Image: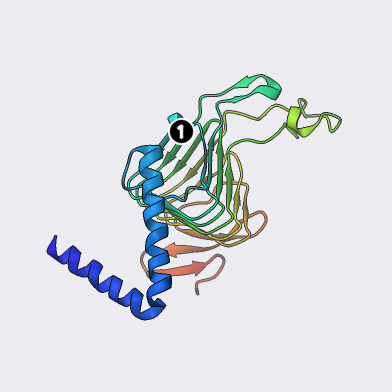
Amino acid sequence: MELVSLRRLHLLKERLRRQGFFWSMQFYYQRICKLIYGLMVFGRKDICIFPDTRLGGIDHMRIGKGFTAGRGLWLEAVTDYPAAGQVFSPELIIGDRVNVGEYVHIGCNHRIVIGDDVLMGSKIYITDHNHGVYRGDNSESPNVPPTERCLTANESVEIGDRCWIGEFVTILPGVIIGEGCIIGSHSTVTHNIPANSIAVGCPAQVLKRWDEDSRRWIRLGSKNP
């Protein structure tokens, strides 16, 4: 306990030295506000979120230890969609020590699972549903307003442990991202990404895989990194 207190004191001194008194106090003021809001909403001291967070369907969320997020977070577990007369039983599961940037939107009407130690950048969109079906025999007509089209259902999204999701990434329904992956910024993930891969692009394609024997990231189609 004494070592933890000494470490915190050292961090405070370093912050004061680098940022000055005003910005250091602003940092701690914001942190206190986030901790108080997390305590008020979830009844827990280990959830650190800004008061501008949008939350829907809290009873259908399971959030692990040490969750932190930047401004503009939107966590949405959709339980009903009156415009189309739909009712859902969503599961939004977030693991331990997940760190999320600013303006991240996670929308779930079936099941989204985010593993432990996941790091996300800002302005990321993760969804397990769409407004309407656009393939096959039951496609939605463009003559129907998008707000009146049925939400798709029964698809999941899974993000494995220790993944790093870059800025402006979109992850679409039915996707599994294996553990240890890196998804490059501005990518759109439309299909499964195997574990320990680096994927980028629209749609995201795997560029490199981690090789445990050589302890290096190997570019696909090449023996060199």
**Front in this rendered view, residue 102 or 208:** 102
119 left or right, relative to 127: left
Residue designated by label 1: 58
Q: Residue furthest front?
A: 22
- Image x and y of residue 43, in percent: 34, 38
User: Which quadrant would the N terminus be assigned to in this image?
Assistant: bottom left
Asked whether the viewer can see residue 190, the reply is: yes
- Image x and y of residue 102, in percent: 53, 56
- Image x and y of residue 63, in percent: 39, 41
Q: Residue at x 32, y 42 (%)?
A: 44
Asked whether the viewer can see residue 63, the reply is: no
Q: Residue at x 51, y 24 (%)?
A: 89
At label 1, the amino acid type is: Ile
Q: Residue at x 41, y 38 (%)?
A: 41
- Image x and y of residue 99, in percent: 42, 55
6 left or right, relative to 203: left
